[in-house]
Image (cartoon, rainbow, N blue to C red):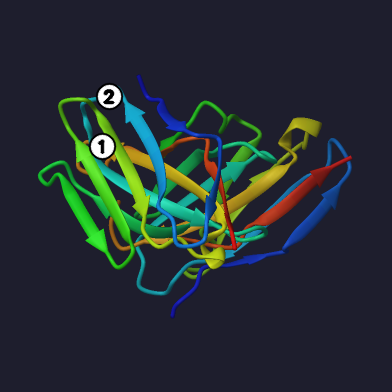
Amino acid sequence: EPEVTQTPSHQVTQMGQEVILRCVPISNHLYFYWYRQILGQKVEFLVSFYNNEISEKSEIFDDQFSVERPDGSNFTLKIRSTKLEDSAMYFCASGTDFYGYTFGSGTRLTVV
Amino acid sequence: QQQVKQSPQSLIVQKGGISIINCAYENTAFDYFPWYQQFPGKGPALLIAIRPDVSEKKEGRFTISFNKSAKQFSLHIMDSQPGDSATYFCAASGDSGNTPLVFGKGTRLSVIA
């Protein structure tokens, strides 16, 4: 069964540093998403991406965040200057339409 | 109005019993209601989903019941098994999918033998 692959599985970074979280969506999918889950809490939407541009973003997705699809297969989330409160599981997801998309296993980001 | 309220927060069920998790929403624009299952260290996996044109959908041991007038939907797991022990999230999205998923806070289910 096709999978959404995320790397790294765990990233530790110092506060103020830039991090890039990487995702390889399922190959024929057109819609891409980033969600995050702070430990023990609900899954929260960050951003959706379609046709090489952001289609929607939440209030969490401020100027410190950016997304890119650099080479037609990867989908990245960049956090420019990490804060302690950015520590969370970050999930990438992809789908053929807006419904029923597939999540990756996540990247655990720890900001120290 | 964008919230999805989920209960209970945790649930312990005997093997073979029925697990019931409830969700409520307020936004009448929501038109897609999926349930996700999440095991520790993994991403949420789509379990079953329903649209508001039907009141019930069954897939194997998993059933969604949907009450449009009450703006509530629930997940029933029949013959619960220890392998069902996981966190379950309800979610909703709307406007024909043009809004992102809004998740409930999750229910940690433990099925004990």
What residue sits right under mark 2 in the picture? B27
In the rendered image, the quadrant that contains the N terminus of chain A is bottom left
Image position of A93 with respect to A109: above or below: below
The image quadrant of residue B42 is bottom right
Left-right relation of A83 to A70:
right
User: Circle 2 marks a residue in which chain?
Assistant: B
What residue sits right under mark 1 in the picture? B94
In this rendering, which labeled residue sits more in front, label 2 or label 1? Answer: 2
SS for callout 2: loop
Label 2 and label 1: CA atoms lie apart by 9 Å
Q: Amino acid at mark 1?
A: Gly
Residue A80 in percent (x, y) is at 72, 40
Q: Nearer the viewer, residue B67 or A41?
A: B67
Which of marks 1 and 2 precedes in the sequence? Answer: 2
Q: Residue B45: which disc?
A: none
Residue B16 in percent (x, y) is at 45, 62
How packed is label 2: few (under 14 Cα within 10 Å), some, or many (20 or more)?
some
Q: Does the rendering let one see residue B101?
A: no
Residue A95 in percent (x, y) is at 36, 61
**Residue at figure coordinates x 67%, y 48% from the top left:** A89
Q: Nearer the viewer, residue A74 or B15?
A: B15
Q: Are marks 2 and 1 in contact (CB under 8 Å)?
A: yes
Q: Nearer the viewer, residue A37 or A46?
A: A37
Q: Does the rendering let one see residue A18?
A: yes
Image position of A46 with respect to B110: above or below: above
How packed is label 1: few (under 14 Cα within 10 Å), some, or many (20 or more)?
some
Left-right relation of A1 to B56:
right
Image position of B22 with respect to B12: above or below: above
In the rendered image, the quadrant that contains the C terminus of chain A is top right
